Image (cartoon, grey):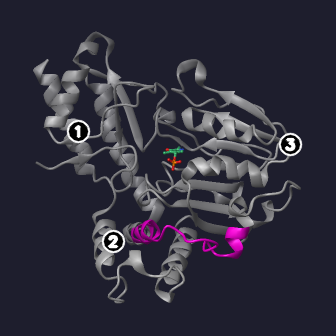
Amino acid sequence: MKKHNFYAGPSILPEYTKEKTAEAVLNFAGTGLSVMEVSHRSKEFVAVVDEAVALVKELLKVPEGYSVLFLQGGASLQFLMAPYNLMGSKAAYLNTGVWSKKAMKEAKFFGEVVEVASSADANFNYIPKQFDTPADASYLHYTSNNTIFGTKVDAPEANIPLVADMSSDIFSRPVDVAKHDLIYAGAQKNLGPSGATLVIVKDEALGKIDRLIPTMLDYRIHIQNESMFNTPSTLPVFACLQTLRWLKELGGVEAIEKVNIEKAAVLYDEIDRNKLFQSTVPNKEDRSLMNVTFVMAPEFAELEKEFLDFATANGMVGIKGHRSVGGFRASTYNAMPIESVQALVDTMQEFEKKH
Ligand SMILES: *Cc1c(COP(=O)(O)O)cnc(C)c1O
């Protein structure tokens, strides 16, 4: 039976990415060697990084004066590298869930963290919109898509530079990079396998604080060495390049956003219509296009396990909700075809007929 992969991360990748990567595992760029066994400084691999950087800049319309890096350590290391490199004595954070909180925890090692607003009062099921940002903070950090709670945030209005964790929605919709000093994303949601982390950083924002920064954690070192200060995660970076090529071929971020909006609409419409289910995010404009979270309606709460089993038997994979929300989460990243979303909707409708 066809499997429909709704995992939150690591998650579905384009067939193109998997095929091209599989080929290169056996024979990379005509070298007769695996992409896993060539020097990262070989001309063939340097070309991979160069093209990936160029495609990131093209697809996200990255302005002049920004550097694109492929690092390791995941978004979780960026929680710490961001304040290490950019925070003076104070930084502002918008708290929209687990990942925001983890980012705040690391920033507290470096100075005063001002939580400008939080949606903790409602288990992070909405995005706070009205808040003041202290003008003397080095930056305002936000999580553009809350993978666990199924909400999304547009770049907040602020009088200071933005820093964004875009791990779970990078390349899913256009972003105004110029408003940001730093954007980072673990690869394993919308870009490639785990092991690579994309960083887009404004060159001018660096070197402004007098803190000493250990070599590996200093963005300037990685910029000077074009992501080759130490050995990059070569295989994941190769796979990321394939996804970037695939996305460009499809028409880029603007084109995929249309598909993402359509996929999300199909699923949210069914959740809102079907008497058995309800969304966990009441405010429609806050609903994520990438992670659709829903639960059984209260009067059908006892059917949760039965639906999970039914959906699994119908080929749905990875729809169990995160433990802090419960219910279900269907992740509909760029690589997911609308047919898989439709298959989930069909399953929900069949289940409704049974009850
Ligand atoms: C998955 C995720 C992370 C964690 O990423 P790692 O690469 O595992 O460190 C951080 N932030 C967001 C928004 C995520 O979705």
Which one is closest to the eye, mark 3 or mark 1? 3
Whole-number angstrom distance, CA of label 2 to CA of label 3 = 44 Å
SS at mark 1? helix
Q: Decide if residue 317 is in sight here.
A: yes
Q: Is residue 51 left or right of residue 21?
A: right
**As shown in the figure, which amino acid type bears the numbered disc 3?**
Ser
Q: Which mark is residue 21?
A: 2
Residue denoted by label 1: 344
Query: Which mark is first along the chain, 1 or 3?
Result: 3
Q: Which one is in front, 151 or 265?
A: 151
Label 1 crowd bin: few (<14), some (14–19), many (20+), radius 10 Å = many
Residue interval drawn in magenta: 221-242
Label 3 crowd bin: few (<14), some (14–19), many (20+), radius 10 Å = some
- For ligand 1, tell me if the residue under mark 3 lies within 8 Å: no
Note whether 316 is above or below 39 in the view shown: above
Note whether 190 is above or below 100 in the view shown: below
Whole-number angstrom distance, CA of label 3 to CA of label 1 = 48 Å
SS at mark 2? helix
Q: Which one is in front, 60 or 83?
A: 83
Examine the structure image and report whether residue 224 is included in the region drawn in magenta. yes
Label 2 crowd bin: few (<14), some (14–19), many (20+), radius 10 Å = many
Q: Is residue 42 left or right of residue 91?
A: left
Whole-number angstrom distance, CA of label 1 to CA of label 2 = 29 Å
- Image coords of residue 133 (percent x, y): 78, 36
**As shown in the figure, which amino acid type bears the numbered disc 2?**
Thr
